[in-house]
Amino acid sequence: MNDVTATSKRSSYRGVRRAGALLLVLSLILPLVPYGLAATGIQLAHPGAELWRAVRQGAQPQNATTQAQEIDGSVLINTWGEAWRVFRASQLVPIGGWVLLGTLGLIGAFYLIRGRIEIEGGRSGKRVPRFSVNQRVVHWFAAGLFILLGVTGLVLLYGRYVLIPLLGPDGFSATAAACKEAHNLFGPIFPFALVALVTLFGRGNRFRWLDFKWFLKAGGLFGHHIADSGYYNGGQKTWFWMTVLFGIGISVSGLVLDFPLFGQGREVMAAAHVAHAVIAVVFIAASLGHIYIGTFGMEGAAESMTRGYVDAHWAREHHNLWYAEMEKAGLVDVPENALEEVKRHDDVDFHGFGSPLAKGSEGGD
């Protein structure tokens, strides 16, 4: 009896072992069957493929209801985030990098070919009033904001490629977090700086036929022939309108991203993110040329925004028609203190309405 029981138990154990071994083999082989069939060209239809394809495409049944009432609450899977990530990694980052590096290369090539633009007649020692205190304050306020937002934005876009090798993951994480907070905090102030720029610099920036002649002569940068110009030349007017248009685009898209409280869904947010990043890269690239010419690239140019005055020879070489009007109005080599006193008493922009320069800034153009 005992022998029969022992034999029966051994037989049961063998059955269990065989069943376990069979299950193990099946669990290893069955997942490989679809791949083997696919390799032979046989396609197996997934029973839920159509359902999940519709879900991923965002197609919702007409009478669908959901307890989540917020924007996109009825969307089960939103693919916009993945689409933006792919665009950012495969197009925006590399193309934007080439645009910025290419701009720096062009500036370097221009410097090697043309060199620094000196005042050909040398400094005269005579000062000509160019920009008022109000204009300079607004310019540097807008410029400071632009530089802060540009640097923090570039850190967020390219920091992982440049700063991680230098600061390490933890250092970059802290830097990126600080840049994100600064970018979001100071970004909404930029539209106010833009309005101030238009208010104080908009007068005299209308394009005229004279500006197209200036472009045909390349502003006189590659020759010794003066390109006629009024208070602003064609290049300055182009930069002004680029600042206005790009500033509006980057401000609107930035506000959409900063304040997702107006009913914008993920599609709108993703589109705003794309627009914001593309405009920012182009805006920064264009600003590099403006910064170069306004500082190191042209002798005497920076003084107009640091002191408010320019040398008479500089004014005659780069804005000859405006200089002629200034000379006619008796405003060449005016004592600095007396001029500042006039501006304080007038309490208006010195180049504004009713001043002797109003005709000079428009008439020469």
Image (tube, rainbow, N blue to C red):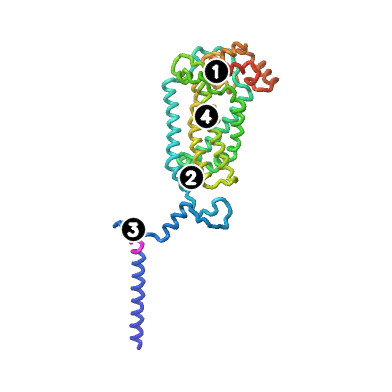
Q: Residue furthest bottom?
A: 1
For disc 4, the marked residue is 242
Q: Label 4 is placed on what type of residue?
A: Met
Q: Main secondary structure of the magenta part?
A: helix
Q: Residue furthest front?
A: 62
Q: Residues within 10 Å of mark 1 (few under 14, many from 20)?
A: many
Q: Residue furthest right?
A: 345
For disc 2, the marked residue is 169
Q: Residue, x 54% and y 43% (percent of image)?
A: 177
Chain-order first, disc 4 or disc 1: 4
Q: Nearer the viewer, residue 347 or 140?
A: 347
Chain-order first, disc 3 or disc 4: 3
Name the disc covering residue 307, or none: none
Secondary element under disc 3, as helix, strand or loop, is: loop
- Marks 4 and 2 close (CB-CB < 8 Å): no
Q: CA distance from mark 2 to mark 1?
A: 55 Å
Q: Label 2 is placed on what type of residue?
A: Pro
Q: Is residue 30 magenta?
A: yes
Q: Label 1 is placed on what type of residue?
A: Asp
Return the x and y of residue 41 as percentages of the image width and height.
Answer: 30, 56
Return the x and y of residue 20 as percentages of the image width and height.
Answer: 36, 71
Highlighted magenta segment, given as a residue range: 29-35
Q: Nearer the viewer, residue 287 or 123?
A: 287
Q: Residue, x 43% and y 20% (percent of image)?
A: 114
For disc 3, the marked residue is 43
Q: Quadrant of the C terminus?
A: top right
Q: Residue, x 67% and y 15% (percent of image)?
A: 338
Q: CA distance from mark 1 to mark 3?
A: 73 Å
